[in-house]
Amino acid sequence: MEPTFNKMTAAGYHAIEQEIEDLKQQRPERIRILAAAAALGDRSENAEYSSAKRDLGRLESRLRYLNKQLQYAQIVQPADNDQLDIGKFVTIEFLDDHDQITYQLVGKQEANLEQQKISFTSPIGQALANHTVDDVVTVNAPNGAYQVKVIAVKRA
């Protein structure tokens, strides 16, 4: 089976690299805590040992996951055109209430609504892909369809 590559921005790729480095720096301390807890004696009833082992396991699991993300990452550079694609910023107007908001279209691993980053695989991301300024787009969301108008498209 052919591997599926995860499209992401260069910034998203570097954020994963940084998280990996941070976790690698935490690893020696977690191992030290585990060793200290193991030295306390009977591991079957040692809550500190169980907790430290679980914490180290979570860290190792997260590292494996992030390394796989990088292994199958495909960094996408936004095209130099007016069409919306990964990495570009889009300002949209919701036609029902005329509210405007600016989002960045990113890979699914980078999506974060608090930072106005939406995944290209989300319903709104899929609907907006490859559209240009003044296009009216119908978004088929789980709670019903709605329309937005593309106000601006900018490169990152």
Image (spheres, rainbow, N blue to C red):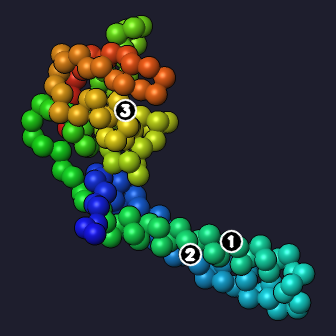
Name the disc covering residue 60, or none: 2
Q: Position of residue 48 (x, y in %)?
A: 83, 77
Q: Position of residue 105 (x, y in %)?
A: 31, 38
Q: Is residue 66 visible?
A: yes
Identity, as a three-letter code, of the amino acid under mark 2: Glu
Q: How busy is the neighbourhood of tag 3: few (under 14 within 10 Å), some, or many (20 plus)?
A: some
Residue tagged 1: 55
Q: Compute the Cα span from label 2 to label 3.
A: 33 Å
Residue that appears at 26% across and 43% down? 87
Vertical placement of residue 116 versus 49, above or below: above
Q: Compute the Cα span from label 1 to label 3.
A: 35 Å
| Element class at badge 3 | helix
Q: Residue furthest top?
A: 97
Of labels 1 and 2, earlier in sequence is 1
Vertical placement of residue 107 versus 61, above or below: above
Identity, as a three-letter code, of the amino acid under mark 1: Asp
Vertical placement of residue 137 versus 95, above or below: below
Residue that appears at 29% across and 61% down? 4
Of labels 1 and 3, earlier in sequence is 1
Residue that appears at 28% across and 53% down? 7
Of labels 2 and 3, earlier in sequence is 2
Q: Compute the Cα span from label 1 to label 2.
A: 9 Å
Residue tagged 3: 123
Q: Position of residue 58 (x, y in %)?
A: 62, 69
Residue that appears at 42% across and 7% down? 97
Q: Quadrant of the N terminus?
A: bottom left
Q: Position of residue 10 (x, y in %)?
A: 28, 55
| Element class at badge 2 | helix
Identity, as a three-letter code, of the amino acid under mark 3: Pro
Q: Nearer the viewer, mark 2 or mark 3?
A: 3
Q: Is residue 93 visible?
A: no
